[in-house]
Amino acid sequence: MDSDGLIEIAARLLKNKEVDVIIGYKNGNLPYTTRPAFIKAPEETDELIFNRFSRINLAGYIKEFRGKKVGIFAKGCDARSINMLVVEKQIDRKSVYIIGLPCPMMLDNSRLKEVFPYPKEIDISDGRIVLRDENRTVELEFNEYVDKTCARCNHRNPVIYDILLGEPVVEKEKDYDKLLGGFLNMDPEKRWELFERELVKCIRCYGCRQICPTCYCDECFVDCNKPKWLDKGVEKSDILFWHIGRIYHQAGRCVDCGSCSFVCPVGIDFSPYLLYMEYVVKNNFNYEPGIKIDEPPPLQTFKKDDPQEFIL
Amino acid sequence: MLYIDEKGFMEFLNIFAKKGELWGIVDNRYTRVHSPELIKISDGPQRFSPKEILHPQDETLMKFEKNEVKLPLEPQNKVIFAIRPCDAFGLEILAQTFLQDPVDPYFAKRREETIFISLACKNPLPTCFCTSFDGFDPYKRYGADILLYKEEKGYLVLDVSEKGKEMVNGWQKVEHIYSERVSETKRSLLDKLNKQKVKTENLKDRLLSRFNDIGFWENHTMRCINCGICTYLCPTCYCFDIDDERIKSRVRRTRIWDSCQFAYFTLEASGHNPRQHKLSRTRQRFMHKLSYFPTTYKNYHCVGCGRCIIYCPVNIDIREIITSA
């Protein structure tokens, strides 16, 4: 992907002192990785890149630069998270300069790693991924290795930006019936079974919470010990309680960036539950998180005519 | 040299599997297995380290009910197949902490009742840097009881502890020819590993002099999200918390993994937190492993397995900190 435009705009913003820092990506030192970068000097902007492994949602880093003016790379999901943080008054829109990037869709690094753990070269062009080292070459279909969060994304173009680099991409609607098919038709016992089986793998590293831009509480309920809401070990009830708590707190707030599933060291897929929350909120309140900058999530407002059919 | 063929070895493991004592890697994690065929071992270290066998994430220390205190020191008999030599070295490093005076009885009991079978490496992963640490030999037994080498159709015993001797008693004595092959594999492994070495000369002092260099830490760790993945997957990180869990009149006192990356790790009752900021927490991890620990115990608190590098979601690399300190 062409990074020249990015570097140019980042260097200009820093040179003109329009921003104090640029939050973006630079190359990682392992295949299929990038690393979040924090660039403060115009001459260091050469390192900036944006490619199909720029997976991590960067919005959460903004709050670490309180009092500073921040320039940030924003794909569709990052932009929605920024919006969400503005709506919830965590950051000041005026202190953020958003460099919007229509998302080319990220690749699923864990599946690629299974196919070819340590390639020396990765070429992505014309809908194909070519992986190579001294001994072999593997060719894959791009579409088959798109991260599943990105494959279902309906807001690949940033909904908010100060400058947009690149051409907007064609978006598609989210087909919840198809995406949640099995889950929607499952009876509660079966759902619980699935939830339990998947979530019990958790080792409580809190990677999901730490990477999530919307998990910004100064004191998370899981850490709180006065009162102590839950125990600290890996008893099933504590693990499940922790995740139910986190997932419910995301209702109408999660932008489905998939970062939590991406970082999870035991490979938990949070999407059925978070997506279900998204579906319920959308259906009942016609609300999509992070789309409008002046509309708080339904659970933070009250209207006399709020729907309540879904309340058991 | 002792040798056992594949079939014989499976029968050997099966004895323990039948007693429910066999543990191995399934889905990247050490799990009890009822059949040795379920164990899948790939090159290099597996995702989870064998640390959790001796120092489980959630370990009941005692139970209280009414006026009674119960110590649940139940028998822990386990046979682990397999760990890697770096992990076996990690077990020795864990023991430096847990078995110093006063000895931790829980760790000691588990250590006593577990047989670790180590499997010599043939191919390193690109993230392996074990030989960077002085004197590390990927063909040494360290904290394991039996060190095996995988032959085409069986296993060779490279070394065995007193405890392990009895177990390999009936295995077949074989000719010298094998040892040539072993040396050859070892040579080619070392060739590869030595290319992946990082400079550890004067590391503890170099790092100490960086303590206040905020720019250095910002550069390497600003992107850290302060999750606990690196510390939980690390074969030597041992920090824990102790908690009392109460259900009605029953209380369970438990020891749980904790991580220096968490803000609550150092939060004091007064409300003061000496490691309030992210950078001081990430710095602590590297300082402890590579500077404070070797000041007390001579060796570093890292075995170069590379797990923290592979599984860090934001690609923080301990090798970069070691080289540029």
Image: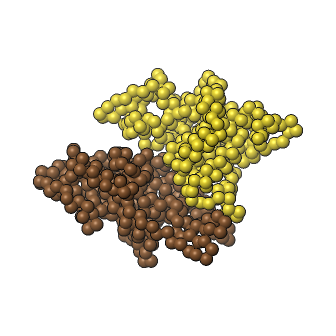
Q: Nearer the viewer, residue A181 or A282?
A: A181
Residue B132 in the image: state x and y as whole percent.
33, 57
Residue A247 in the image: state x and y as whole percent.
65, 45
Q: Is residue B136 above or below residue B108?
A: above
Q: Is residue A133 left or right of residue A202?
A: left
Q: Is residue A133 left or right of residue B317?
A: left
Q: Quadrant of the C terminus of chain B?
A: bottom left
Identity of the residue drawn at 36% across and 48% down: B35
Residue B93 in the image: state x and y as whole percent.
39, 65
Q: Is residue A215 above or below residue B92?
A: above
Total marks in image:
0
Q: Is residue B182 left or right of residue A118?
A: left
Q: Nearer the viewer, residue B15 or B92?
A: B15
The answer, for residue A21, to whether it is visible in the render is no
Identity of the residue drawn at 41% across and 47% down: B26
Q: Quadrant of the N terminus of chain B?
A: bottom left
In the figure, the shade used to draw chain A is yellow
The answer, for residue A276, to whether it is visible in the render is yes
In the figure, the shade used to draw chain B is brown
Splitting the image into 4 quarters, where does residue B290 fall?
A: bottom left
Q: Nearer the viewer, residue B289 or B99?
A: B99
Residue B226 in the image: state x and y as whole percent.
56, 54
Identity of the residue drawn at 58% across and 43% down: A193
Q: Is residue B149 left or right of residue A206?
A: left
